[in-house]
Image (spheres, rainbow, N blue to C red):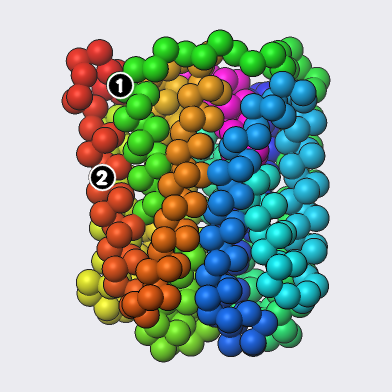
């Protein structure tokens, strides 16, 4: 097996644990947590926001960690902490307890995202870049699919059983990821832990950073409220919300890899605008036209959102080159952390104040549309088109 492929599989398993389970498994659990009385609706929403704000903190501390640790030990440490967060979430010890562990797993997700993507993007050959990043982000989709299938069934045995099941899936993914990162220790690809020189900031880099921030704002409505919107907002129940979350997982698994395949053929610049545009429609659609077909379409489209990370990571590598990729990718992750922190708290306050999901999802759709505009590969003749 080529080293880049083993690294990509390790990255997929890492993001399965950190993002697929550590972040997105909370969404199908949220209505049950509220209905069970474990948390109020406001508390449950703010815990989702704490998770998003942890991502910003993780992006800020990653440079310090990268100066002290090589990639494989750092990623394995993040794996262990993420798994501990899932295990500790099993115990129903109240708002502050759960908020802390949800915040901490948000921190580890950022560490995983920066280091895993940088390592894989550098190791992958140019003709397999889309495939490599696609494999990594497919892990997010597999985690969403696992939570969508397992959580509704496990909730029949109680919240504790649901959290326990997620922790068990996380343990398996941690073992696969541990194996995948072993090649980083045993190959000459091991990174120099000294920080790279900061690249020159160009207009193309700024647009990528801003577009990635818009992407994070656009994700926030579905990330926090999608299952809750269906279960309580549309009064269709937890089972219906869980079924839609399964569709989210299917969209994530299939859409992510297809996006990498498409980018390798028509170019990362064009693909990025296309994916942003489709996401803008998918995020806003279910509150503009409430119908079974639009709910299914929105679930599938939102599920495919890791596809944008696949394409924008490849686009960044094209714009700045493999040497500057880790530095620029950290800026992009910081933009995501800032955007989702603002959106997380802002949209929770918006819903609490209005009791209406419509402005929440329309805000997300508008942010995705703005990301498409910033991603247009026509702003500068010096930008690579593909």
Residue 114 colored in magenta in the image: yes
* In the rendered image, the vertical position of residue 106 relative to residue 192, given as above or below: below
Q: Are marks 1 and 2 in contact (CB under 8 Å)?
A: no
Kindly identify which residue carries mark 2. 370
Q: What residue is shown at x 58% (from left), y 81% (from top)?
A: 40
Q: What residue is shown at x 46% (from left), y 82% (from top)?
A: 231
* In the rendered image, the vertical position of residue 42 relative to residue 283, given as above or below: below
Kindly identify which residue carries mark 1. 203
Residue 149 numbered mark, or none: none
What element does badge 1 sit on? helix
Instruction: Specify few, some or many for label 2: CA neighbours under 10 Å numbering under 14, 14-19, or 20 or more.
Output: some
What element does badge 2 sit on? helix
Which quadrant would residue 268 be assigned to in this image? Answer: top left
Please provide percent x and percent y for residue 4: 63, 25
Q: Quadrant of the C terminus?
A: top left
Give the mark, 1 or 2, whose residue is nearer the N terminus.
1
Camera-nearest residue between 159 and 251: 159
Q: Main secondary structure of the magenta part?
A: helix
Please provide percent x and percent y for residue 69: 77, 25
Please provide percent x and percent y for residue 173: 73, 50
Q: What residue is shown at x 22% (from left), y 39% (from top)?
A: 373
Horizontally, residue 142 falls left or right of residue 216, namely right
Instruction: Specify few, some or many for label 1: CA neighbours under 10 Å numbering under 14, 14-19, or 20 or more.
Output: few
Q: Which residues are magenta?
A: 111-128
């Amino acid at each position: 097996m080529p080293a880049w492929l083993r690294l990509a599989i390790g990255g997929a398993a890492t993001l399965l644990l950190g993002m697929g389970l550590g972040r997105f498994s909370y969404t199908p659990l949220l209505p049950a947590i509220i209905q069970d009385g474990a948390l109020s609706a406001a508390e449950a929403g703010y815990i989702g926001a704490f998770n998003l704000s942890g991502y910003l903190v993780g992006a800020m501390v990653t440079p310090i960690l990268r100066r002290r640790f090589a990639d494989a030990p750092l990623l394995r440490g993040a794996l262990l902490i993420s798994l501990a967060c899932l295990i500790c979430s099993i115990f129903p010890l109240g708002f502050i307890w759960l908020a802390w562990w949800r915040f901490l797993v948000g921190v580890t997700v950022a560490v995983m995202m920066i280091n895993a993507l940088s390592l894989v993007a550098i190791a992958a050959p140019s003709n397999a870049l889309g495939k490599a990043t696609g494999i990594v982000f497919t892990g997010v989709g597999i985690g969403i699919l696992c939570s969508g299938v397992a959580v509704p069934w496990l909730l029949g045995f109680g919240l504790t059983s649901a959290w326990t099941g997620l922790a068990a899936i996380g343990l398996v993914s941690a073992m696969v990821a541990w194996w995948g990162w072993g090649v980083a220790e045993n190959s000459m690809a091991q990174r120099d832990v000294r920080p790279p020189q900061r690249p020159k900031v160009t207009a193309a880099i700024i647009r990528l950073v801003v577009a990635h921030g818009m992407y994070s704002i656009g994700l926030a409505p579905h990330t926090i409220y999608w299952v809750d919107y269906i279960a309580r907002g549309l009064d269709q129940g937890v089972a219906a919300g869980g079924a839609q979350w399964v569709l989210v997982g299917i969209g994530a698994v299939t859409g992510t890899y297809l996006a990498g395949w498409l980018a390798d053929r028509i170019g990362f610049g064009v693909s990025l605008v296309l994916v942003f545009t489709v996401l803008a429609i998918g995020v806003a659609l279910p509150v503009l036209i409430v119908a079974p077909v639009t709910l299914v379409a929105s679930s599938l489209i939102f599920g495919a959102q890791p596809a944008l990370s696949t394409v924008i990571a490849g686009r960044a590598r094209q714009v700045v080159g493999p040497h500057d990729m880790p530095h620029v990718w950290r800026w992009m992750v910081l933009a995501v952390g800032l955007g989702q922190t603002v959106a997380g708290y802002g949209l929770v306050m918006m819903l609490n104040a209005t009791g209406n999901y419509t402005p929440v999802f329309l805000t997300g759709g508008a942010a995705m549309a703005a990301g498409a505009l910033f991603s247009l590969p026509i702003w500068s003749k010096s930008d690579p088109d593909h």
